[in-house]
């Protein structure tokens, strides 16, 4: 199953981002991608957007963003995963990931649980947190099947979220991100993405925004596809847009879990309850 993780620099203009998504989806599909993952904030980059402006953008553009995601999925006969800002009844929008199938049907929707509040920044100022665990859903392409979970950026620091996905049958996780730059942050991202794949003994597909902001360095990039033993099989660096493409074989999960039965070896039973 050929999968593409898009590394792009969203702007503060949703219309511009829509055109960039059309271009990148076409490029990925031309390379044979049947699952296409866009980064967090693909709809609009948060840098330089005020709270009031973001709420207005969500109200004006969210439904069009959902329609675009469905359009790309149908046009390219692919599963498309994208992330934007969904209006809420509470004023502040959700940071929401959607997955749409090749027939235009919505497969999953996830409102980000773990809002970023670290290194002197806080998403709580402009975004409302979701209140449900991320979903899992099945993707079947040409006889190959994967059960995907969804995660969003700061979620990568919370291994229990990924374990909850595995306990519901996930053997692949799509992670969208706009990972903020800063001292040590590239190392954090590199370590955490590999760790989440390895401890889950699952594929991890991470699509990350790159650049942006006043210095064109607000987000770190480093989009990558990691195999179930924690090896980065394809990836991009911390600068520049592009597409990460890899053949993601479901059978690799079975082989990895055969030689590394860590999930079977667990002796601590977990139950998941939102705080």
Image (cartoon, grey):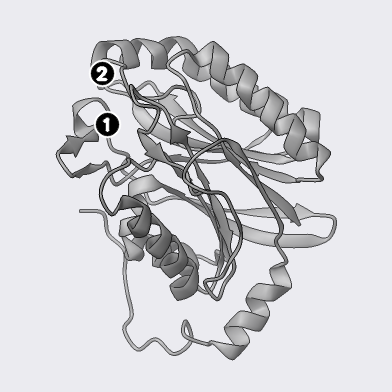
Q: Is residue 104 visible?
A: no
The residue at which mark 2 appears reads as 91
Element on which disc 1 rests: loop
Element on which disc 2 rests: loop
Q: Which of marks 1 and 2 is nearer the N terminus?
A: 2
The residue at which mark 1 appears reads as 128
Instruction: Classify residue 215 by image quadrant.
Output: top left
Q: Residue 272 carries which label?
A: none
**Residue drawn 50% across the image and 15% down it:** 14
- Relative to 50, is 213 on the left or the right? right
> Percent x, y for residue 264?
48, 86
> Percent x, y for residue 98?
53, 36
Mark 1 Cα shell of 10 Å, populated few (<14), some (14-19), many (≥20): many
Specify the farthest residue to the left: 120
Q: Along the line of sight, which residue is nearer the eye, 58 or 10?
A: 10
Mark 2 Cα shell of 10 Å, populated few (<14), some (14-19), many (≥20): some
- Against 166, residue 140 (above or below) is above
Q: Along the line of sight, which residue is nearer the eye, 235 or 249?
A: 235
| Separation of residues labelled 1 and 2 (CA atoms) | 8 Å
Contact between marks 1 and 2 (CB within 8 A): the answer is: yes
């Amino acid at each position: 199953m050929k999968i593409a993780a898009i590394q792009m620099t969203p702007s503060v203009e949703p219309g511009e981002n829509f055109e960039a998504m059309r271009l990148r989806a076409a490029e990925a599909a031309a390379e044979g991608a049947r699952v296409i993952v866009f980064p967090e904030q693909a709809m609009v980059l948060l840098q330089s957007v005020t709270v009031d402006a973001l709420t207005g953008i969500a109200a004006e553009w969210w439904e069009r963003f959902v329609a675009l995601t469905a359009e790309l999925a149908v046009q390219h006969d692919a599963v498309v995963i994208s992330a934007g800002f969904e209006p809420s009844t509470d004023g502040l929008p959700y940071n929401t990931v959607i997955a749409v199938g090749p027939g235009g049907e919505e497969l999953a929707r996830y409102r980000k649980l773990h809002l970023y509040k670290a290194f002197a920044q806080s998403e709580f100022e402009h975004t409302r947190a979701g209140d449900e665990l991320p979903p899992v859903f099945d993707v079947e392409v040409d006889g190959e099947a994967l059960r995907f979970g969804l995660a969003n950026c700061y979620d990568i620091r919370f291994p229990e979220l990924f374990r909850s996905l595995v306990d519901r049958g996930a053997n692949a996780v799509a992670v969208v991100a706009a990972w903020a730059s800063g001292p040590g942050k590239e190392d954090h991202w590199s370590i955490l993405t590999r760790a989440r794949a390895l401890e889950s003994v699952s594929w991890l597909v991470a699509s990350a925004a790159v650049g942006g902001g006043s210095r064109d360095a607000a987000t770190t990039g480093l989009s990558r596809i990691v195999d179930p033993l924690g090896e980065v099989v394809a990836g991009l660096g911390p600068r520049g847009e592009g597409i990460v493409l890899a053949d993601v074989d479901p059978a690799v999960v079975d082989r990895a879990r055969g030689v590394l039965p860590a999930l079977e070896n667990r002796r601590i039973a977990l139950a998941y309850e939102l705080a």
